[in-house]
Image (cartoon, grey):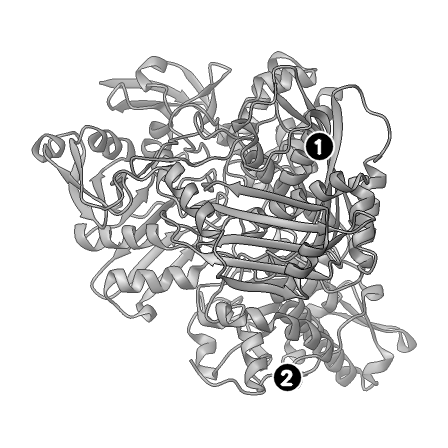
Amino acid sequence: MTIELRVNGVSHQLDIEEDMPLLWVLRDELGLKGTKFGCGVSACGACTVHVDGEAMRTCTLPVGAVDGADITTIEGLGADQAHPVQIAWIEKQVPQCGYCQSGMIMAVAALLDENPNPTRADLDDTITNICRCGTYQRVRAAVDELSQA
Amino acid sequence: MGKFTRRAFMATGGLVGGGLALGFAFAPNRLTIYTADPDSADAQLNTWVMITPDNKVVVTVPHAEMGQGSQTGLPMMLADELDADWSTVSMVQAPATEIYANSDLARGFVLGDVSLPNSIFRLLDYSLFKLSGMIGVQNTGGSSAVRYTGNMAMRSAGAAAKHMLLQAAATRWGVSASSLTASESVVTHAASNQSATYGELASEAALMEVPLQPTLKSPDQFTLIGTSQPRFDIPSKVDGSAEYGIDVEVPGMLYAAIKHAPVFGSKYQATNLSEVRASRGVMDIVELDGAIAVVADNFWRAKIALDMMELQCIGGDRQSMTSAQIYDRYAEAALSEDGSYDADIGDTAAALAQSDRIVKASYRVPFLAHAAMEPLNCTASVTKDRCDVWVGHQNPLGARAAAAVAAGMDADNVTIHNRMLGGGFGRRTPTDFVTQAVTLSRQVGAPIKLIWSREEDIQHDMYRPAVANHMSAALDADGMPTAWTNSYTNSGQNEPAESPLTQYAIPNQSIKGVDVDSAVPIGAWRSVGHTQHSFFNESFVDELAVEAGIDPYQYRRKLLADMPRHRKVLDVAAQKAGWGEPLPAGRARGIAIEQSFGSIVAEVAEVSVSDDGDVTVHKVTAVIDCGTAVNPDSVVAQIEGGIIYGLTAALYGDIEIADGCVVQTNFPDYPMVTLQQAPDIEVHIINSGEAIGGVGEPGTPPIAPAVTNAIYQITGKRIRNLPISAHDLS
């Protein structure tokens, strides 16, 4: 089946199975490796991208369900690491191994779009991404800085 | 490998692209083997440091980056000794070759052929007990990067390069080297008002004699070490450009998904192969040792084809094995009078017989999976005469050896392209997944990227060993221990050797391990033996304090009277955490301290338990004495991360066995601490100036006992088996 996607401003027409998860379309069909595979069951958030502006986990999201959608991945978030979340992430030295951080950053960017001054409870409830290196303290610090800005 | 010579440590100062390359080599012909591009002006030799004519410093780091920051901390150590302008310093990761094995300097020392600065002899001497295990290992683990590579190789290379630059300037200007100063990559002769950049001097410096015993700075002369510098790897980790093993693309590459037979020691047999073969994109089905793999043109297609396979698990002798059986067997084994002694001091039997205050307790910790965020993966390309492997690995030399065996060729024909690691924690030290990828490529005849699913990662790990023990202690009239016994099960991975020891001054000690069969594959897990033994030791000493009726912090303090570094770490932790200050109802603090990997860490956890028995860790105050903190912000980050890693294990971590298989499958049933459960963490660093200690692991051990000790204060319930979530605290 032919699927139409607009990814980071570029339109694609793809002849692929509609039940292929968007994650693998992005990674293996479009070569966008910044979005990560972590669990395959939408539990960890490493695969989070923006679908029509909303944060979504893509490892269980069939590409057929987002036919025609406008998708932003970590590669399209900000040129030259200039998105405010990216700047804060560097400033607070958030990443360690960094593998979960594409998803973490996309989730936080979507939250801040919707709620520029999240409380700690908002953050805890919304950002359920798993980071095995345990960078949570710095995620909080970076979001605090962003919400005061 | 060539014999070490006196010049082995500092290879000749090579003239490379008009610059100075200073390194480490065994034989002259080795110098050009790994040149990245011989025609390039910046040709890369097997060197620790290269100074280019345009005044840039490039440092080669032999350790992998998995977020621990050693690819920044090590260049800092070199640049400090070099007095380089930090803004001109960059790093490259060393190829997997023996030249960069981090045992080499120490091995040379053992052979007596390498001349090293006197100031590091003591450190070497201290580390010799570990060397046999390190030989030939270019390992990233054991919190070793800064401790060994940094102190031995990086600082010496930086100091030697600086010496040669000063000699070059002295020769050029006809002045004495002692009349020169070096700072920010510039050599200055103040008397004649002359100066030159390192880049300008590099080609002349390369002709100077290499000092075999360069003078190292004393800690008060450090200008870069001890300052917080942004990590080199972070910018690429905020825009998706960092390339992990799983991101590698090789022309003509196919993808493989794998399923291991669930029962340990068994095999898989498939029945509907023709149906699977017909699935879109499927290219091949390959039987591996205890596993089966489907190869396709896309990972997802390989995965769904594998999922449609009808598989039968056959063979194996552990079909009925359960956690309860394993635990019973361990508890029984630990009762044995036999065992291998870690400490046998004084007469514990007599001390126990004389005391009328005996405390006894038995503890147990479960198997744990590593669950690094990046699922295990490896890409391999085997052709007629060579094998290329792209992988994020903690032990690239081990990976090369395993790949060579699987490819059926000499290790010299194998190249490991080490990539960023999406977490390691010890799981990326074994080579099982490398062997599988190479075997697949060899069999299929195409480059293969093998990716394990999360379920395979959880169910076929090399687990942190479960350990059970029995402890006893005798207290004197003041409540202080006169005897301490600990008999624990040892199924391997019981290292470092000091991990079972108590750090407290107790006159009679009997600490021994009883060998048991682990029943499941085991491996090193962040902080290795300290994860289990810190929980045992720091819980049991808390029980003694309770029995003695003495505050647990003060009790430890008394027992550490002759250990000033420990005592200071403990005191600062207690003070910063407000130990003894009132807390809201239902909240309490617990404390624990552990020395591991050359660093001492104390942690105070502030915990509450709800009426329903839900545990909340509100705040953790941690103090570390790692001798000298090279990059303090990275030290803080590692302690923060080590605490979260240990907290996940303490609260939830439990790999259970039923019917010979691991019960847990993925994050929903092997849960992790997320933002919601993550405490506020405050880290304080003590720069004692003692030998540099590791920081990647020492944050993990104390958190479990700190939390369970606090839970005891609140509930009166002593948690002797982890995880905490298995206990009803309502």
Residue kind at label 2, given as amino acid type: Ser
Disc 1 residue crowd, few under 14, some 14–19, many 20+, Cα 10 Å? many
Q: Residue at x 40, y 30 (%)?
A: B666
Subunit that carries the residue with mark 2: B
Above or below, A68 relative to B516: above
Q: Viewer-proximal residue, B450 or B287?
A: B287
Residue B361 point in image, percent of width and height: 60, 43
**Residue at the left extreme?**
B274
The number of discs equals 2
Residue B158 left/right relative to A10 = right
Label 1 secondary element: helix
Location of residue B542 by image quarter: top right
Which residue position holds label 2?
Answer: B115
Location of residue A112 by image quarter: top right
Above or below, B100 relative to B88: below
Residue A145 left/right relative to B319 = right
Label 2 secondary element: loop
- Quarter of the image for the C terminus of chain A: give it: top right
Which residue position holds label 1?
Answer: B710
Picture disc at residue B446: none
**Residue at the right extreme?**
B191
Q: Is residue B700 visible?
A: no
Subunit that carries the residue with mark 1: B
Residue B250 left/right relative to B199 = left
Residue B410 point in image, percent of width and height: 29, 70
Residue B436 point in image, percent of width and height: 28, 51
First reached walking from the N terminus: tag 2 or tag 1? 2
> Are the two marked residues, 2 and 1, in contact with CB atoms closer than 8 angstroms?
no
